[in-house]
Image (tube, rainbow, N blue to C red):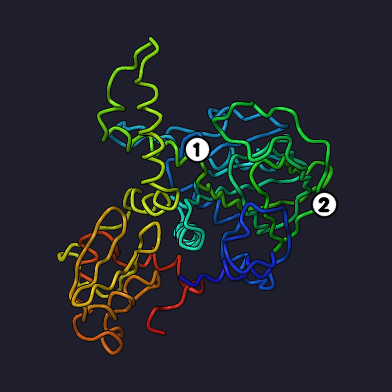
Amino acid sequence: MDHRLINAIETALGWSGAEELGKGFVRGSLDDPALVSRIMTPNRLLDIAMRRSLNRPQFRCFQKGEEVHPAIYYTDSVSPRGQSIPMVNMRSLGRLLDEGATVIMDQANVFDPTMEVACRALQWWSRERVQVNAYLTTNDASGFPLHWDDHDVVIVQLAGEKAWEVRATSRNVPMYRDADPNATPSDEIIWSGTMRTGDVMHIPRGHWHQATRTGSGSGRSLHVTFGITKRTGASWLAWLGDWCREREVFRHDLDRRESADSAALAEAAVQLVRERSSADFLRAYEQEVALPRHVPFLDIFGSLDVVVCTTHFPPRINELGEAVDVVASGKKLTFAAKALPALRLLLSGRPVVLEQAITVAGTEVADIAEILVKEELCAVLTPELSSGYTGLVTNAVS
């Protein structure tokens, strides 16, 4: 999937692919000024909050370094039949923002099509799970205190400006579940400065950082943080722990007395490591995730006209002589070899207008598309979902 934002991030950071993720702090600027407002604006973020029933921790507000109690800016919307739904009180939230506050929308990709498609494109690019949080800060408000994240982040400043400080790690590659709490910040400042509209920054896992508008006067800042959680050796060992249950030697009770059991277990563990490598784990990881949410295709709503592949990771297409296997999201579908051109088009991650695709992939493309939609590897491109691709990902036929 060729996504305009990813191309711009690579250019800004001097990257040629996802291999640089996590290797070092780097910053740059997007060379496409129109792109930032296309991704998200402050008003669009607030509009999302206004139209949905969001709860903590999906939507939070902070003032003076402390979280504002939800009761201050949430109101129960009561229907004529007395049904109550918690909604953000936009007047109350407006007063907080006018005073100076930070609002955070966790997993904005769940609520906004543009963010959804951007995260999907980043997942195809990095082969890791990605989520995006949006941060809107107004006037003199501070942000989070100095902290570190247990994942790599790519930060894009979309509006206004914010002062940042980035420090070195005080523990190499720390983890959420770790043998050390890693609570003492490093004294080494790697970079201190202001992120302005269009700036991009990559902060690897474990680097201490903080951002604020304190002392900046009136104004605003909107940035999005793409969190990219990479697999580790610990992830691989946890996966092996599940596979060990296949073998009887691991299912027996442990004997507290010295016996030959420990030697047998050690030998079996070594054999398991040899048989299921870290590369095997990474391939399996891409297939084990659940299918994404999407609008179901039903004939009663109309014909299937435009589709797009919505798997979390790129499907694998294996050519087998007379047949072609498609492997994605825990499924394996087998097609005749003549379906290959249609499959490559439909599974490209780019929107496919079926009427146009016939000229490229043959008349069978519509039937194959229907199979992929029913198997939930592709989805109907609704107008709402289409808005996440428009101007960012080109039509597959073009």
**Label 1, label 2: how far apart the Cα atoms are:** 35 Å
Q: Residues within 10 Å of mark 2 (few under 14, many from 20)?
A: few
- Name the residue located 54 percent from the left edge and 56 percent from the top edge: 44
> Is 157 located above or below residue 389 in the figure?
above
- Given residues 148 and 331, the one toward you in this image is 331
Residue that numbered label 1 is attached to: 234
Dot 1 or dot 2, earlier in sequence: 2
Number of the front mark, 1 or 2 = 1
Percent x, y for residue 31?
69, 73
Count neighbours of disc 1 (C-alpha within 10 A) and say few if under 14, some if 14 to 19, many if 20 or more.
Answer: few
Q: Position of residue 87 (x, y in %)?
A: 45, 38
In this view, the residue farthest toward the top is 257
Taking 334 as reference, is 41 left or right? right
Is residue 233 or residue 149 the one in the foreground? 233
* Residue type at tag 2: Gly
Which quadrant holds residue 168? top right
Question: What residue sits right under mark 2 in the picture?
Answer: 193
| Residue depicted at 66% across the width and 42% down the height | 97
Q: Is residue 183 above or below residue 336?
A: above
| Left or right: where 385 falls relative to 102 | left
Which is more toward the observer, 163 or 96?
Answer: 163
Q: Residue at x 34, y 53 (%)?
A: 287
Q: Is residue 266 above or below residue 387?
A: above
| Quadrant (top left, top right, bottom left, bottom right) of the C terminus | bottom left
Image quadrant in which the N terminus is located: bottom left
Left/right placement of residue 193 relative to residue 255 reads right
Task: Provide the secondary structure element on which disc 1 rests.
Answer: helix
Identify the disc placed on residue 341.
Answer: none
Residue 41: % across, % down: 60, 58
Label 1 sits on what residue type?
Ala
